[in-house]
Each structure stands twice: as structure tokens, then as C-alpha cells.
Image (cartoon, grey):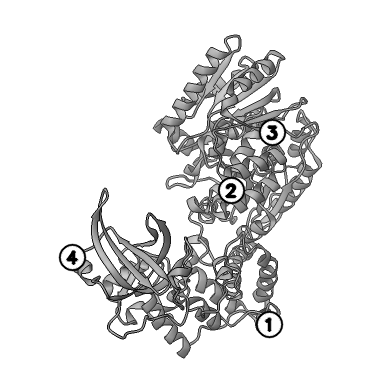
């Protein structure tokens, strides 16, 4: 079944190139190009029984056809059967088409039924003119609607899948799942599932198919989830066979550092630190994910891991997805490490040439023991002297291949560097199981003592005046506040203007307060001065864009106002809210919104009002937006799932995990074949 598509009737080089855009390279690929939805053309519906919004097959006799001009040219064709009348409306038509619809002609058409000014109508239906005494043709199965690409019509895709299905009957795809699994789960054979999904019978449960819940869909989803899981576990197994520097020294340095901290580590931090230090002492690369809600103290845990590595004579590198977050890490680590005689190096894409050359030199000659930067760290021209530990923050913003690129920078005679990835976006267990199966997971599930839950309310922006008064009152009592303006439509210019406008409004409304402004277009030094003034209490109200989403820690700030909260995602709002509630006093977050709110925006704001638990927020974010947004797969180049849905099919993951472990020990050949079937050339996603 891996024969080229050009072996099918009707496929030449030009069509083959178009099909490649759909990921179709061989006949088996066609079998796994499943319909997005189905249409029922198995039975004729009487015109008198039509329902608005339904898509139906009808037949009737033309009563009249006319061209009318109502703002634009319309061809109206009135047809009837013995139960009623229906109008067919065409905006784009030729003279020849118009001539087909003369009175008395029998026509069959399929389309969406809508209410028009003169009763029900179909706009641009598919239609067929019937010859004399010819019956209206129905189909034997539901009609599949496939993913489309320019220049390839649905009829062509149906014809090609018909050919592929005939070939499949002669040479069925190999069953790669263990028979014990398919029997236990009551799954159909792979060939039967594929046949059914391409050509469902008339009595198929359409709602079940549309929602991805049919046993045939679940059969394929299970195998696809298994392929992804197996590929990630192979990455993990590969790492276990590789060498890494065993970092066994540095205990006294780490102990002194922890003892000198101005706060006591939480039990969760201590547990995770023990797990990391144990991993680092092994002669194989650590591959560990730290999950922790906002404010749980991941950064200091990362600092202890870095100090351990540096004390053992290797370099440590920290990569963050944005310059703002990377800068914040650089400042934090500088404050911690300079007293120890360690000067962190800085590397980013916006660096001036001279500063970049200096950083590259210190990284290459080993004088820089700790390097902080953006994705610039794994670009060409960056050479490390002895990279022993890689830390990646906000892991969901990077793909597997990007993690591997930085890891590969550190390959030396001693082996591969240890790898620690962190995220402040808690990931639901089943999703983490599917997406991060190559990593061991640690969770910092405890907040520092004294942290109180932030009280959250949603308020329409018509009550802006009340909120301004609330800010005045809070600041008059000695507290500080944030006023956040979101990034609007990914535009720095609009973002800047929104922050400027709010700054002007609040400066005029609150003349007795010191109001500051921070946004992404400021020079780093200017931005830092504003943040520092806020930290020192010189600024009472800070107007900011979402640059303050990460890394800002001002315990005296107890009030946050978020403008246009309905425009923002759950996880981002939760991150912003985490900037307050860091001191002893009760903190509040006000979500200002512009009514009317859509259904999802209402749900989003309600979730934030009802919980401060990052894992609950992440689970609901996953349900509302899907895994692609939560994990960042749309930006990172991680493979999309063709059939499986990580939200819908979450309950399959425990059995996927059990099956994968059994296959890895008993049938590595089948495991490799499943990976090839679903992921193709997986080298671009990592060394599988």
C-alpha cells in the first residue's frame, strides 16, 4: 500500500504536487485521509418536510426560472414536488446553465436549506438535470467531505479514495496492534475501520461520527496516539543509552546557597530539588519537566541546578522564549550569582554586534559559566566550551526539535548535557502523558507560606469610574496596583497606543498618585527603570502591557486591573493574576470587559472567578481552546494529530501507555512500523 499515488488512475505529476499539500504521498496516505464530516444523500426528502439549517437531497419539477436584479444579478429557479415548493438561488451562473432550467424539467439538488423571502431556498446547491423517465440517484453510503486543497475537488478525492479502498481489499494494511488489545477494547480491524469511515452505511450514527466517538474512529485514534507516545518513549530510551557528565560534586556550594536564601524553601521545592540533583549525578542525561503554578518558586530551583552544574566544572545555559522573560532571568540569576563570583553571560537576537561577539567569545572559551538567552542560544555560530546543563523555560513555547537543537550544541567527549524544562502552564495529566512522554515530570504543587488566593471579579467597562476609585483607595492605603492593557491583534503599535491612552487617562483621573508606564517598545534600560521604581514603591500605579505577565515580583502590589479581559486566553489571564497575591495582604484582580460577551468569553471569565488552581484553569483552557494552543504546537512545528484529539480521546491514554510499554518489550518491529505509518519521517521531530 506504500505504492506511489501516480499509480492511481487520473493522477499525473501536477495533481500529485497538489495532493502533497494534503500530506498525500502514497496510496496508504489516502486511506488515512479521513473525512471532516458527512452528508446524507442516501434518501430523498420531500420539500414539504424540509427544515431550515438541514442539508438535504430533494427532487422536483421546474415551475419557472428568472433572472432578477436585487443589488446583484440572481438566477431564481422555482421547483416543486407533490408536497411543496423550493427556490434555488444562484449568484454565479452562465447563459447555458440558465437555459437548462426550462419549465417541466426534472432536477435533483443537494444543499443547505435556508429561510428566504418567499419560503425555503437553497443557495448554489449541487444539482443534476434528469433525463426523461430517469430516477433521482441516491447513494448507498453517507457522502464524505474531505479536507480540501486548491485545485482538488471533493469528487476527485472520492474517486481516488474509491480506488485506494479497492486496492486495500486486495492487500489490507498490516495489523500492528496486538490482538489482545483490539479484543480487550472491542475494536474493529484496521481495514474494516478505514472502509467504514470512508463510506459509512446509510444507517450509520452520524452524530457519533461527527463527534469522533464512533468505534472505528476510536480504533484509528488509539493507534495514532500510540505512535506519538512510542516515538517520545524512544527518545527517552535513546537518552538512557547516551553518556552525560555525572555531576557528583558541589554539595557544599549548593548547601551554602540554600542556607543564605532570605526565605525557607517549601516542601515541594525541596522534593523537586532532590529529584533533580539525583538525576544530575547519573552518567546519563537528565530529561525532566518541572511544572509549577505561578509563584511556586521554579526559578530558584533552576538556580540551584545551575549552581550544582557550575560547581562541577561544566557550563549551564537557560533559554526563554521571549527577550523579556530571558532578561528577567538574567537579572535574577545575576543578583544570586554575582556574590558567588559568577557573572552570567547574555545572548539574544537583538544584541549589538560588539556585545554579541564578546558573549560568544566568553561562551566558547569557558569563562562564561552561566549563559542566559533566547532561541539565539542554539543558532549557528554559538559554540560552548563544556555545556553540561540546559534549562528551558516556558517549555510549551518550544518544540521537541528546538529542545534537541540546543541539547546537540552541548554534545562533547563526555556525552550529552542534562536537560531541565520548566512551565508555569500546568498541564493536565493525560495531556502531559501524550505530549511529554520523553520527560520525567516533577510538580511543585505548593505555594510559599503566606500566599493567599487572589479574589477575582469580572466587571463591564461601563463601570470604569468605580474601578478607578478603587485604585485610588488602594494606593491611598499604601498598596500598589497594576493596570494591564492587552496586546490587541498582535500589533505592537496598537498595544503601545492602548497603554499610552490608559496612562493618560489614569494620570489625569488620579493626579495625586505616581503613575508609571511600561510597554514592549521601550528600550530595555528604560523599561527596567520603570519596573525598578515600581518595585521600590516610587510608583504606586503601573500601567503596563502584558510584558509583566512573567517574572515580576512586587509583594506590595495587591490590585490588578486587566483591560479587555475578554480578548485574552485563560492561561495568560491566570499568569497575569499571579503577579499579585505575593504579599501578606488580601489581593484582588478585576477583569474589565466590553459587553456583549460571547459564550466562550463568558465561560473563561467565570472559570477565573471560581478558581485560583492553575491545573483547573489549564484543564478548562484545554477544553475551550484545544491542545494546540495550550502546548504551542501551532508555533513550534510539533506534528498535528490527523485523527486523534487530545481532549476528546484523553481516556484512551492510560491504555495507550500500557500497550506502548508492552510493545516496546515484546515487539519493537511493530512499534517502529506504527511510528512510520503515522509520523512518516520522524527525524524532523527528534531522533526517533
Q: Which residue is mark 3?
A: 456
Q: Which residue is mark 1?
A: 183
Q: Which residue is mark 2?
A: 395
Q: In this rendering, would 19 be left or right of 640?
A: left
Mark closer to the observer (3, 4)? 4
Which circle's residue, 1 or 2, is located before the other in the chain? 1
Which circle's residue, 1 or 3, is located before the other in the chain? 1
User: Disc 1 versus disc 4: distance between alpha carbons?
Assistant: 60 Å
Mark closer to the observer (1, 2)? 1
Instruction: Name the one closer to the observer, 404 or 447.
Output: 447
Outermost residue toward the left? 95
User: Disc 3 versus disc 4: distance between alpha carbons?
Assistant: 63 Å
95 vs 618: above or below: below
Q: Quadrant of the C terminus?
A: bottom right
Q: Quadrant of the N terminus?
A: bottom left
Outermost residue toward the top? 512
Which circle's residue, 1 or 4, is located before the other in the chain? 4
Amino acid at each position: 500500500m506504500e505504492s506511489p499515488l501516480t499509480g492511481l488512475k487520473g493522477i499525473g505529476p501536477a495533481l500529485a504536487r497538489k495532493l502533497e499539500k494534503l500530506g498525500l504521498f502514497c496510496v496508504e496516505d489516502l486511506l488515512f485521509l479521513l473525512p471532516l464530516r458527512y452528508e446524507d444523500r442516501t434518501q430523498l426528502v420531500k420539500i414539504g418536510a424540509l427544515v431550515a439549517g438541514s442539508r438535504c437531497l430533494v427532487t422536483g419539477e421546474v415551475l419557472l426560472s428568472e433572472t432578477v436584479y436585487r443589488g446583484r444579478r440572481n438566477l431564481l429557479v422555482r421547483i416543486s414536488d407533490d408536497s411543496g415548493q423550493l427556490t434555488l438561488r444562484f449568484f454565479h451562473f452562465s447563459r447555458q446553465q440558465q437555459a437548462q432550467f426550462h419549465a417541466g424539467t426534472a432536477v435533483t439538488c443537494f444543499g443547505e436549506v435556508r429561510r428566504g423571502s418567499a419560503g425555503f431556498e437553497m443557495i448554489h446547491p449541487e444539482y443534476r438535470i434528469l433525463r426523461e423517465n430517469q430516477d433521482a440517484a441516491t447513494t448507498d453510503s453517507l457522502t464524505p467531505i474531505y479536507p480540501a486543497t486548491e485545485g482538488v475537488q471533493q469528487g476527485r478525492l472520492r474517486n481516488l479514495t474509491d480506488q485506494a479502498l479497492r486496492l486495500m481489499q486486495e492487500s489490507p494494511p498490516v495489523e500492528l496492534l496486538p490482538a489482545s488489545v483490539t479484543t480487550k477494547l472491542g475494536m474493529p480491524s484496521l481495514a474494516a475501520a478505514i472502509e467504514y469511515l470512508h463510506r459509512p452505511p446509510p444507517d450509520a450514527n452520524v452524530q457519533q461520527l461527527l463527534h469522533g466517538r464512533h468505534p472505528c474512529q476510536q480504533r484509528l485514534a488509539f493507534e495514532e496516539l500510540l505512535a506519538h507516545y512510542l516515538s517520545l518513549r524512544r527518545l527517552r530510551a535513546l537518552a538512557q543509552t547516551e553518556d552525560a557528565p555525572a555531576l557528583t560534586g558541589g554539595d557544599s556550594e549548593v548547601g551554602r546557597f540554600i542556607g543564605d536564601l532570605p526565605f525557607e524553601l517549601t516542601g515541594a521545592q525541596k522534593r523537586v530539588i532532590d529529584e533533580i540533583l539525583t538525576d544530575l549525578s547519573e552518567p546519563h542525561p537528565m530529561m525532566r519537566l518541572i511544572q509549577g503554578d505561578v509563584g511556586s518558586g521554579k526559578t530558584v530551583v533552576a538556580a540551584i541546578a545551575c549552581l550544582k552544574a557550575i560547581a562541577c566544572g561544566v557550563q549551564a545555559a537557560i533559554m526563554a522564549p521571549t527577550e523579556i522573560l530571558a532578561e528577567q532571568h538574567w537579572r535574577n540569576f545575576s543578583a544570586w550569582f554575582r556574590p558567588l563570583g559568577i557573572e552570567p553571560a547574555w545572548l539574544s537576537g537583538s544584541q549589538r554586534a560588539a556585545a554579541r561577539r564578546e558573549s560568544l567569545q566568553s561562551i566558547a572559551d569557558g569563562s562564561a559559566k552561566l549563559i542566559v538567552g533566547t532561541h539565539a542560544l542554539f543558532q549557528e555560530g554559538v559554540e560552548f566550551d563544556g555545556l553540561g546543563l540546559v534549562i528551558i523555560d516556558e517549555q510549551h513555547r518550544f518544540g521537541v526539535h528546538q529542545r534537541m537543537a540546543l541539547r546537540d550544541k552541548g554534545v562533547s567527549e563526555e556525552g550529552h548535557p542534562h536537560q531541565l524544562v520548566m512551565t508555569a502552564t500546568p498541564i493536565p495529566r493525560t495531556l502531559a502523558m501524550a505530549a511529554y512522554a520523553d520527560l520525567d515530570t516533577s510538580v511543585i504543587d505548593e505555594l510559599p507560606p503566606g500566599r493567599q488566593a487572589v479574589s477575582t471579579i469580572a466587571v463591564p467597562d461601563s463601570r470604569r469610574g468605580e474601578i478607578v476609585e478603587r485604585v485610588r483607595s488602594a494606593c491611598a492605603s499604601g498598596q500598589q496596583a497594576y493596570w494591564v492593557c492587552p496586546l490587541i491583534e498582535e500589533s505592537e503599535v496598537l498595544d503601545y497606543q492602548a497603554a499610552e491612552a490608559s496612562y493618560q487617562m489614569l494620570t489625569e483621573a488620579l493626579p495625586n498618585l505616581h503613575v508609571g508606564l511600561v510597554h514592549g517598545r521601550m528600550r530595555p534600560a528604560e523599561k527596567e527603570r520603570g519596573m525598578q521604581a515600581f518595585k521600590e514603591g516610587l510608583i504606586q500605579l503601573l500601567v503596563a502591557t502584558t510584558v509583566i505577565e512573567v517574572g515580576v515580583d512586587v509583594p506590595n502590589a495587591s490590585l490588578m486591573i486587566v483591560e479587555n479581559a475578554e480578548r485574552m486566553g485563560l492561561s495568560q489571564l491566570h499568569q497575569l493574576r499571579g503577579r499579585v497575591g505575593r504579599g501578606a495582604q488580601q489581593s484582588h484582580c478585576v477583569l474589565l470587559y466590553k459587553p456583549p460577551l460571547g459564550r466562550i468569553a463568558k465561560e473563561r471569565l467565570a472559570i477565573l472567578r471560581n478558581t485560583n488552581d492553575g491545573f483547573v484553569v489549564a484543564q478548562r483552557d484545554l477544553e475551550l481552546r484545544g491542545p494546540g494552543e495550550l502546548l504551542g504546537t501551532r508555533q513550534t512545528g510539533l506534528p498535528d494529530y490527523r485523527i486523534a484529539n487530545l481532549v476528546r480521546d484523553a481516556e484512551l491514554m492510560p491504555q495507550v501507555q500500557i500497550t506502548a510499554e508492552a510493545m516496546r518489550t515484546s515487539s519493537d518491529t511493530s512499534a517502529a512500523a506504527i511510528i512510520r505509518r503515522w509520523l512518516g519521517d520522524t527525524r524532523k521531530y527528534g531522533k526517533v
